[in-house]
Amino acid sequence: GEGFNADPSLNRVMLDATPCNITAASTTSITCFITDKTPGGTRELSVYVDNLGFAAPNNQEVQVKTAFVSDVSPKVLHANGESAQYSTFTMVMVVGKGFDPNCTRNVLSIGGQTCGIVACSTSSITALFPGNGTSADNLDVTVMVMDKRGEVRDMYTLADSGVHQREDEVASIAALLSPSQVPGTGTELVLQLGANTNSSSVSGLALWPSLNPEEMGGKYLTSYEDLFEFSGNNLDTSSSSIVSDISPALPNEVYYPVVHMEDGTTLVYTAPITARTAITSLSPAAGSIGGRTMLTIAGTGFSEVPDENVVVIGVPTSTTFLNGVILCDVTEASATQLTCVTRPHLAAQASANDPMARNTMPAPTPPGDVQVVLCDAGLNDVLKFECWSDSENGRSACEASVCTFEYADSLTPKVGSISPARALVGQEVTISGERFGQVVEVQLRERTSHMGGTMHSEMHTDTNSRSSTSSDVWATIPITFLERSRNSITFTVPQVSAGQYTVTLRKFNDELSIANSMGAGNLELPLVISSTTGFIGSREGGNPLTLTTPDSSVGFNVTHPEQNAVRINTLPCEVVDVSSHQLTCLPGPMSGRVLAEYWQLTSGTSGFPAIETFSSPDIARLEDSVDINWGGGGPGGPVDSDFFASRFTFYLQLPATQEYTFELDCDDRCAVFVNGILILGADYPNTKTVTSIFPEGQHQFVVTHVEHAGAAKIQLRWAIGASSIQDMPWHRVTPVRSGEPMAISVYVNGAEARQGCPSLQSVQVKLPASPDNAWEAETVDLPGPTCSYIYSAYRTPELTVPLPDIISSASPFEVTGLFLAESMSAMDYEFRVDGVLGSIDSTVHGNSTYPTLMLTPPPLPAGKWPVTISVAGFGYAAPVQQDTQSRLDVRYSLTVGSPVKPAGSYWGGFEAEVPGWGFVPSDSDEYEQIMSLEATTSNPGFEATVVSASTSHLTVRFSRIVDHDTVIAQDSSSRTVGWRVKVDNTGSWDAGQFQLEFDPTYTPFFTSSPSSLVSPDTSGTSIELSWNVKARTEFEALPAGAPSNASIELQSGPNFYPCTAATVRSSMVDSSNGYSENTTCLLPAYLPASNYTIWLTATGTSYTLGSGFARDKMDVPLSVNSISHTTSSAAGGLTITLGGLGFSTNASDVVVTFSNSALSYQGFVMSASATSISVRTPRVPEALEGPTVLDVFVTPSHGATPQPTGFAVTFDTGITPRVLSVSPNRGSTAGGTTITVSIDPYGPQLDGSSSEYSVTVGDLGNGQTCSDVSISSDKTQLTCVTAAPSPRVFVPQVVHVLRQDKGWAECGDVSDPMATPCRYQYIDLWSRRTTWGGNAPPREGDSVFIPAGNTVLLDVSPPELNAVVLQGHLEFDSSATAELVLRCKFILVNGGSLSIGTAEEPFPGKARITLVGTPTSRQLPLYGNKVLAVRNGTVTLHGQHKTPTWTKLAVTADVGDQSIEVVGNVSGTWAVGDRIAIGSSSVFGVDAEERNVSRIEFNPDRNTTTLFLSTALEFTHLGVVVTVDGDDRGHVLDMRAEVAVLSRNVVFEGDETSASFAHGATIMIHTHGSHPRALYQGEQIEMRSTGQAFQLGRYSLHWHLHGDAEYK
């Protein structure tokens, strides 16, 4: 031909889909070789040239003669005698080459009998052999390959095949013992085996659907892919001749039994079994919209396990029921009858006013189909819908006249209204509505949340979900009504908990009513507050308030106390005790709070509205001050960051009549009102001030603020008299007026209590001891029935002397105040620090007006803690009036005392007890403080560790000194070391110090010790040593034989070995030399060779003094007397055994090095015992250039020095084969892949037998050893079969080839698996049968499920599939040379991932996902059809970057031009064949054009690129920049048309029908409930034919009610 590329790599020749290997090419000819993988028969020849496309014509055909049969298994087939009613067919596999992967084009005959073909590849055919009733030997095996017209184009016959046909002496099935008519689930299949078949050799059973044994000859039996395999959990082979198992759920179909044998043989029996699940009757055919209709379904084939039957009823599609079905909950089941209870049909369509579709309303339905689907037990609602949607799951046929159910208005009681809607116990309530004639009971359903009056129906993911309402049903209270008519019912409210209830009516048949409008079924039962005690108290709060209800009222919620809420105006009152009719709460402080109210304004609001007159805020809460900087944010909740209004209200007692200055700063506008009068306004960016005289007393302040857009802030400050501007005393302000009654609000289960408190006239607030003030009335009237609380300065105890600034010990301290208590008893007071109870001295000093209390603080860590001093009948005391504190608090300092034991050994090894105050307890995690210990003396040599701590005590352990080379004597000077204890309290440090003397006087000194041992074998050996301590007062002389005052250890490196049973031989106490002792101790049974330091720790009569060591070390010798090998591969890997005595038994403590004067390499110690070690030799790169001799050194234990062994090892390149490649370099995770390791033929080869070699994939410690190792005759190739990896590893791993007596083959740098030719990767390739359990890869129409923990690499383009469900991972193969196309109806990512490239490594080839279907195709629940549904998991799609993505014309392009010139260099990423768009230069958008690029040329002199187009342009596109004459402002009009590249190498698209149906592909990301958000990331991908018209929420890319989901 012509137009080929002279570079062979830029051409592709294909015979159908099989490449022909190109060996030479010119512009006019290509030479290629047909491979063994090419099917025989007629093949279409195509030639593709990179950057040009396919050569024409494309209809050249080649007759390929490659068919060949090399083997058939099994060798003995069943003949099927003519007398038998049914036959046993044998599954055979024919192995060879040249077969057509399209099974319809192959014909297989064995002994002249045409087989039914099951599966095909180019190298194998699997088929069913029917047998002809007679025995025969060496049957001819013939394969014929047909063309698409059915003509034979290639044929091969294997004569003398060794395949025999036998009536006897072969595995067979004799009879079907179970019924031939079976239900669709739980079917027991029982088979009688043939005389020569034992049940113990059976590995499993299956059923084959849609097989016609009479007509199978020569046909492609596609139904084999739908084989129903039994789980094997119930496989019974206890009888030698009978086998049975329980089948999975089966669709209605005719099946044939299949038996799998352990030797791989598969038998098929031709006795038919018919599975049938059917509905024969259904009653009733209609029921209440409110649900609870008891539906009885008669039929056949149901599961006797209720939960394995899923019943669905067809209903109209809505946002609530996107899949158009509703579940009916099965309660009872037998094989012939089901009973299920319907759910209410409450539905809604999402809209702008109800985007979440929460306002569900009852809706009647037309008759909808009822189906029974056989599923697994224990499914939640979502999985039940998934089971229903899978067409492969067994489901009922309708054999009744009608198999439908409708939600009927005529059968539904409807609640129209309830009067009164708020009622009390014993009160009569009337329900009005329709169709009450069959109602027998009223039910009250208590709710924790209010959902607008109707029960909201949605799918629940919890297995035991009732699924009928989103409100939790606490209780269903049946009530017998007083009166009933068709349209009304009257009942009396029973004695129940207060709360909000939904009223539901139950019919005689248990069906339930509905509410016919929002809120129509709601009844509120409030409790009545009849009295209060403790209703006057301190402004600081803390005076218990008790609320009481009458016995006849509904009560508080005792079971769930958190459902009781009390507020005093806007202030919370903490519930501390509750019974049915009484509740006590603790009012919080009123001071230090500002009432803040926020409103969302209409977008675009301008000006400054009269916020002081606003009502019904969107948010009402308490703030600490009017000093808030929101920045770019806002108040949160329902109020956005732009266009909102704020109002802050507080009261402040001004100390004197004088001049006050107020400063106001805000963004955007604000104002201040005092006692209702505007005094100051400000707007951004101006800060405004006002100065005026205000009288002494309590004043109301209102600050208003409006934010339009951008940043937001508000700040109010002040100055008193001539002082400078400063923060206002926010700790003194209150959100409500002090001294005035405030309404108490009580809510129980969401229902607000009614007020029934009596009117009280002239309540005396001021007491005789109360201080005077001019802003509160001394008496207050409390008008009923509203229950009120009074915060009063008259009832506020107040300190007159501030608390101490710092508490540094547990010593008591005094406080004095105006406490208001009439008695002088300490019982009237309570003192707490951070809630921890302190103590109060029983004697109260001073006088009754200003008593003085003696307080003892509780122990707490250092830090600042809140303090409460509570006075009975009043509440918490306030700080001193002039104090700047907003609340009482005190700071605990850290105090560190002197250690109880002032000194210890110079070398450490003891513990010290340190008293103090403010430590952080070590046994508690309730404190945020962090305590640390550090030395203040440089280089102390010790490590100090806190062993235990309480708030007043530390135990500190001092390690033995690390550097003990210094020589000291008993009369040497001691060392003083300081230590700092630090406690971090929210970023600020408290610290205290203590000192210890490390004193030679307290140090044990050795006077004699052993210097060496003969052997490491020390079993039963004792040593003798002598020592003394000068601190004689700590010891008493001990008699011989007594336990020693010392414990003794031997140290080598970090390892310590105890010398046990230390016993006194003699001892004495001397006034000048102190205490001396001669001691013996028993060595361990074995000591590894090393130089040991002997340590002794001395314990006196009262405490441990510390440790000392023997200056002379004790030597334990090493002996090495043998070595197993002295020559190793230069690549290492040879296991050498060294024999001797003195090795550590811990292999990680032993080091073996191979060294000479210039080189040193460390081996890997694999095992160690006292008498031998095994070490793997290292790779010695220098030895690859020539033999290298290295001496062997052993470090026998941790801490020992390297010892020469007297042995050397020669690392010899002459015995080191070099690996060139591993092929294939990836294979199945199931193992079983045959790999070939190729050796450099010009270097050392694989001498010896295959039994001397092992091949390991992966780390040598846990890698996988290959089996069936064999070596080629020329000694340059090694083959083996991989094992399955455990655990699974999906990254490339090193392949180690080991000759047992020489070592590894050379592989280069094995530390990087990608840098060595010796690499192999376990992976599940889509194209491999092992990925699919030995079956063929998925075929057209299959559904694919990848389970969790599995990763499949899509390396081929599969046929069109039904569904792909990913709980595991599917990844497109980045090494694929051809475009990968995944074409299916939908993809569900549910716990796994789908990835095409990554952000770091975009996909290099071409990939395409095409979703197929029409608007009527089966829907995936919630997500719809033709969808990539991302429910739980990750989807990442990353294509190659196009840079730039768009540019502009550099020159005007006219009509008829076939090239355009664009700005810049786009030749780097834009490519020939890309589709580009050229923007319109007219007023008509349709003048934009799309073209393909046929050639690209960069013009460096102009920095432009010329793009040659596939067809000429139809419109003019401007490439000019225009300036206007006379325009003195220099305007420039850029009229250049935009040019964008549309093509990407990764494509997501809808199929060819998308445009005609306006129904394209979609991506929906939606995670249900509170599960972790599913993640999607796409970049540089092309989306074509996406989005679905006339479908709610079916956008091209849709995050559905997904919340925030940042990709991670």
Image: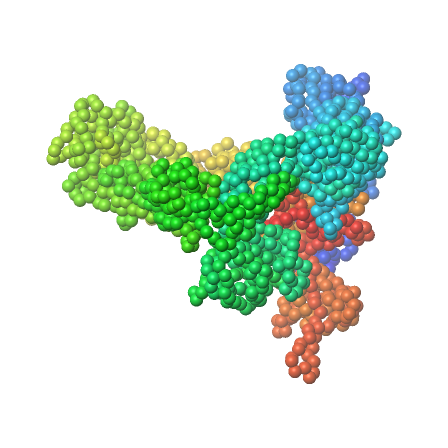
Query: In the image, residue 140 lies at what x, y percent?
Result: 74, 29
Q: Nearer the viewer, residue 360 or 1414?
A: 360
Q: How is the image coloured?
A: rainbow
Residue 345: image quadrant is top right
Measuring 66% from the left and 25% from the top, which residue is drawn there?
232
347 sits to left or right of 875: right
Measuring 29% from the left and 46% from the top, which residue is drawn there?
993
Residue 504: image quadrant is top right
Residue at the extreme bottom of the image, as rendered = 1526
Residue at the extreme right of the image, as rendered = 401
Measuring 75% from the left and 43% from the top, which residue is drawn there?
518
Residue 579: image quadrant is top right
Q: Nearer the viewer, residue 1576 or 805?
A: 805
Q: Nearer the viewer, residue 203 or 46?
A: 203
Query: In the image, residue 519 lies at what x, y percent?
Result: 73, 42
Measuring 68% from the left and 59% from the top, which residue is drawn there?
602
Q: Nearer the viewer, residue 655 or 1264?
A: 655
1078 sits to left or right of 387: left
Query: In the image, residue 858 lies at what x, y percent?
Result: 38, 39
Query: In the image, residue 260 lies at what x, y percent?
Result: 68, 26
Q: Is residue 858 above or below residue 689?
A: above
Q: Is residue 125 visible?
A: no
Q: Is residue 1493 visible?
A: yes
The image quadrant where one finds the N terminus is bottom right
